[in-house]
Each structure stands twice: as C-alpha cells, then as structure tokens.
Image (cartoon, helix red, strand yellow):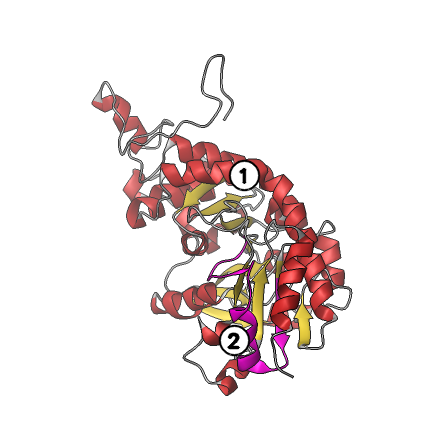
Amino acid sequence: YRPGNGEPRQIPIVQSTTFKYDTSEDMGKLFDLEASGYFYTRLQNPTNDYVAAKIADMEGGTAAMLTSSGQAANFFALFNICQAGDHIVSSSSIYGGTFNLISVTMAKMGIEATFVSPDCTEEELNAAFKENTKAVFGETIANPALTVLDIEKFAKAAHAHHVPLIVDNTFPTPVNCRPIEWGADIVTHSTTKYMDGHGAAVGGAIVDSGNFDWMANAEKFPGLCTPDDSYHGITYAEKFGKEGAFITKCTAQLMRDLGCIQSPQHAFILNLGLESLHVRMPRHVENGQAVAEFLEKQPQVAYVNYPGLESDKYHERAMKYMPKGGCGVVSFELKGGRKAAETFMKHLKLAAIETHVADARTCCLNPATSTHRQMSDEQLAAAGVPAGLVRISCGLEDKEDLIADLAQALAQIEE
C-alpha cells in the first residue's frame, strides 16, 4: 500500500462483503477472470490484497494470498495441486496439527503421504517419491521440535522428481530466513505467530515464488495445466504464467469453494504487526539465545533444544540458513519429569501458561499437563514429548528479567 497525496497513511479497512458495479457486463468480466477487481470478499478484498502483497515482497515471491489460519494455508497450498489418488512427501518433524492434516484428514480425501526424517540421507529422501507424488512439505524450524530443515536438500529432491517444495516459514519469518532463495517454491505462514506478534488475530498466508514451471510438468498438475470448466475453460498456467497461476487458482477455486477467508479487520491487525517485525525478531532471538544458554547450565535441566546453541545438533544447519538467528522458542526437559514441570510452571511469574508461541509476551507450556495430558508418561516418551518437556516462547521482555523468573521457578523444584 502506497498512499497518494492526502490519502490515509494506514491501509484502509474495506469492511464490505460485496462491491457495486454499473453494469452486469463489468461484473461478468470479473467472474470470467478477464479483469482484475473485487466482487465478493470471500474471494478477494483490497485490505487483504495489500497485506498479501507486502508478505510476497518480504519473501521474494511473485504472488500471495491470506487465509483464515496457518492450517488453512497449509491445506490450501497442498490441496491446490493434489487430488484423490495423489501422494505427498513430508518431513516427519512438523507441527502436530499439520501432521494430522496430512496423515489423517487428507488421507480420508484419498491423498497419501510418506513421512521422512529431516535428517534422512538423499538416498532415503529420493526413495520416498512415487509416480503420483505431487509435492514435498517441511517446516523451516519445526514446532515444537525445533529441528531445522535442510531446504536445499529437500528442494533438490523435489525438483529432481518434478514437483514443488512447500515450506512453512512461520518461526523464522522472512526477516531471518527466505526459503525461496534456497530453492523452495511455495512458502506458507501462520501469521498468527510472529507476523501478528501480539496474540490478536488468527491468520495464514501462502506465497508463490513464481519459479516453478507448471507447464513443463503439465501431466502432473492437470488442475493448473488443463482447462477449468468452472471458469469457461481457462488454463491457469497459460493465462497467468508461472508467476501467477498457483495463487490465482487457489483463490478462484479453493477460496471460492471452501471459504477459509481472513477478515479485513484481521488483515489490518496483521499489517500493524508486519510494520515492526524486523525490529521484534532480533529481540526474540536475543532473548531465546540468552534463555537457552542459561537453561543449558542448570542442574535441573536434562537437555535444551535451541538451534542457536553450539551444542545443538542443528546449529550448523541453522547458521547456514539463518545466520541472524531463527526464533525465540526454546524447549527443554526437566530431570524431575511431570512433577518437576508442574512445580516449575506453577511458580512462573513473568511467563504466562498459554497454548501459544511467538508472542510479544513470554508464554510457556508443558504438553504433559496440558495438550497431551491424556497420555501416560510411557506414551509421551514414545511420542518424543517426555513428561518433563517444557516449551517456552521468549517474548520482548528484558532478558535478565526472563532469566530471573526462570531461575526462581527452577529453585522451587525439590531435588
């Protein structure tokens, strides 16, 4: 958004479901995708488009769209090129909700998936592909495991099998990592997290790099490369080119039919967060690094996961893709298990217990006593979420205050 002389400095909130036209012919051109403009906010809205364009620019993409949540963004990005009978290759280390989306819900739609370790060899990764594979998926920094994706390795395999790599870049944001520069074709975000940054508005975004040549692989992507009868036979990849075909189809088809729209009010709030993102992310990283280094030295702590630590197995990879740091999320296991975690969490004063991350305020979660409380300690260990695991999302507070809060809470744990 670039205001003209005398126009509002802030993006206008176009809080309207519909738009007026002088003639049916004018509106008809929009429905035929022959002209650009707006006719119903479920498909497009000026406020949303301003914000989507900003995110596309930040990621180095050619087109973008907003969705109602990060989950909707990941579903749309995959379903836009997959249908019943197709197959997805995905990193196994991804957000649990996305794992369920791919492994359970999309499986019910006839779309199968093979999950591979983010640490797999190139041979193991290539072995996961099938004739009907249509996409590869991974997270830059996985939530909450904090594993770091080897973007170049996954991009190389995807392109060798003529399919795009889709990367969820929620945790680093484009301030700290731009996956497109490392070979990713589509980038997704839960804008609810750092992009919003204040726990105010749920949302998602999809960015197309504009680099993947759909027509060169037309037999794999009929939805993009053959006529769409619901739009008078338009072939998206021909009419809108590789720079615009993916997002145009995703908007014209999936948003039209499934309606997972972000409201203009939420887009306005998101834009406020974007304006300070480049200032906030270095502080989140600074606090995450300080907290991780402090926790690593504490006798009550069994181990710490944070790619910024030199001792972390993903440190070298993180420094390659995110030399300025990744994010402010740290996970660690307390030696005393569930009881120690309960005691620790109960005595926190500054950090709030929430099912949220990437907020301006520090928040903390013990899965064993909250999101995973129905599972036994044995089941938790098998799932890679031990009973004593704590995830802390370091906010924008003073790092010395954060460390003091953690120290006094740790001191309450009985030996």
The residue sitting at 47% across, 13% down in the picture is 6
Circle 1 crowding by C-alpha within 10 Å: few under 14, some 14–19, many from 20: many
The residue sitting at 49% across, 26% down in the picture is 1
Q: Residue flagged by tag 1: what amino acid is it?
A: Leu
> Residue 351 magenta-drawn?
yes
> Residue 189 magenta-drawn?
no
Q: Which mark is residue 342?
A: 2
Tell me, yes or no, if residue 378 can be seen here: yes
Outermost bottom residue: 378
| Residue 327, image x, y percentages | 63, 54
Left or right of 89, for residue 405:
right
Question: Viewer-proximal residue, 255 or 311?
Answer: 311
Q: Which residue is mark 1?
A: 274
Q: Residue flagged by tag 2: what amino acid is it?
A: Glu
| Residue 112, image x, y percentages | 43, 69
Left or right of 177, for residue 40:
left
Q: Quadrant of residue 18?
A: top left
Question: Viewer-proximal residue, 292 or 397?
Answer: 397
Tell me, yes or no, if residue 235 can be seen here: no
How many numbered badges does the structure rendering display? 2
The residue sitting at 52% across, 57% down in the picture is 357
Q: Is residue 203 above or below residue 30?
A: below
Q: Quadrant of residue 385?
A: bottom right
Magenta residue span: 330-358
Considering the numbered disc 2 on the image, is that residue within a helix, a strand or a loop? helix
The C terminus - image quarter: bottom right
Left or right of 382, for residue 31:
left
Circle 2 crowding by C-alpha within 10 Å: few under 14, some 14–19, many from 20: some
User: Nearer the viewer's eye, disc 2 or disc 1?
Assistant: 2
| Residue 45, image x, y percentages | 36, 33
Q: Is residue 227 above or below residue 325?
A: above
